[in-house]
Image (cartoon, helix red, strand yellow):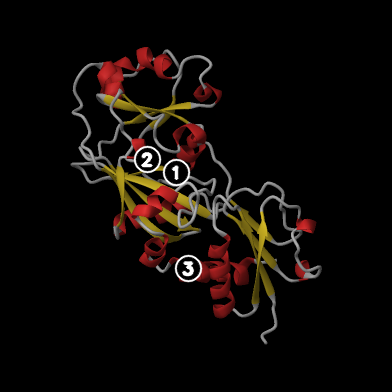
Amino acid sequence: MTEKTHNLVFVNHPTGQERRDFDEIAAKIEAVAPGIKCYIVPHDVLVEEAGLPTDIWARPALTVAFQWPEKFRPERGVFYAGRPINKHEQMHKFAKAKVPIPTTVAYEFGRALDRSVWGDFVIMKPTRFDLTSQGDAVFLMRTQSVAQLATQVFPLGHPARTASVLIQRFVDTGVFLESFRVLVLFDTPLYCMKFRRRSPRAPLQGGPEEILQIPVASTAQDDYEHILVMDAEVIALARRAAEAMPAIPLQGIDIIREVGTGKLFVLENNPGGNTWHFSSHMSAKGRRELSREKRIEQFCAWDVTAKVLAERVLNEAT
């Protein structure tokens, strides 16, 4: 039997990842790197309650949690964990890393926007994750109507007002709205998926109130399909975007392509970690259309994950 020299600790959130995923990946890690011993612990117990061997922290260790654990904290070693990052801060980090993003600013309510700067349409979105995770609180507005409509969609007392509200240049992805999601573990993609609306978007005509009713997120209202794609440009941009926040282990990078120009823009990286849609509760409905097995098969995600994490443990664990 190979002597164990390093430890890898997975922190499991049952709504975010099925335990069996980590069991299967751990078996692959111990096969390719026999010196690594893997452990899986619940996120909501203290380290002394996790049932770990008493001597576990005598070896170099690395702990990874895709979502911030409620209680568990390792006693030693490197600790990577997902955490929410405000969308405004994300945009700042992307811009600093020269990752292409739509022009984005925090909106000051009552402020009129210059159509010559922003174009005919803009997007208004809150920065609170719980309001935007499905795209239903993202609004398209005529630029000259923003000052009038902003307080209509987000009046005083609305939950969106507890954090920044953003204005973003409208990037048209076509009549059938599309976006991409690349799941990236550190700097390595695990799958690349396109979301495409099944119904065509209404024409960008009519008055301000009519425009406001047009959905602009490809994943709004559950009227979309999931398609695995191999798009080299999208994948390369997702890698660059993930590198802008290297301390976050798992990032669901959302990317759109502008119709006509073909330019790509990153919208966000979903760093909180509830993006492990191989088995998360959030994507249970989507897996009826695109199964867990197909998502895993696209890039051999379990083998890739095992390789990436084994290398991290052997190179970084302390």
User: Going from the N terminus, do you reach mark 2 or mark 3 first?
Assistant: 2
Q: Are marks 2 and 1 in contact (CB under 8 Å)?
A: yes
In screen coordinates, is 198 left or right of 98?
A: left
Residue tagged 2: 101
Relative image position of residue 102 (x, y in whole percent): 35, 36
Label 3 SS: helix
Q: Is residue 237 visible?
A: no
Relative image position of residue 70 (x, y in whole percent): 68, 46
Instruction: Please determine whether, in this image, residue 317 is positioned above or below residue 243.
Output: below
In screen coordinates, is 220 left or right of 6?
A: left
Residue tagged 3: 302
Task: Please give the name of the residue rendered at 37% of the width and 63% of the height, measured from the top-left corner.
Answer: 294
Task: Please give the name of the residue rendered at 56% of the width and 79% of the height, measured from the top-left corner.
Answer: 31
Q: Tell which residue pokes out farthest to the bottom in this image.
A: 1
Relative image position of residue 86 (x, y in whole percent): 53, 36
In screen coordinates, is 35 left or right of 171?
A: right
Q: Amino acid at mark 3?
A: Trp
Instruction: Please name whichever residue, 98 or 297, is drawn nearer the observer in this view of the structure.
Output: 297
User: Going from the N terminus, do you reach mark 1 or mark 3 first?
Assistant: 1
Task: Please give the name of the residue rendered at 48% of the width and 68% of the height, measured from the top-left corner.
Answer: 302
Instruction: Please name whichever residue, 33 or 153, is drawn nearer the observer in this view of the structure.
Output: 153
Q: Amino acid at mark 2?
A: Ile
Instruction: Please determine whether, in this image, residue 149 is positioned above or below residue 222.
Output: above
What is the distance, in whole Å, between disc 1 and disc 3 at their CAs?
28 Å
Q: Amino acid at mark 1?
A: Phe
What is the distance, in whole Å, between disc 2 and disc 1 at their CAs?
7 Å
Relative image position of residue 99 (x, y in whole percent): 39, 46
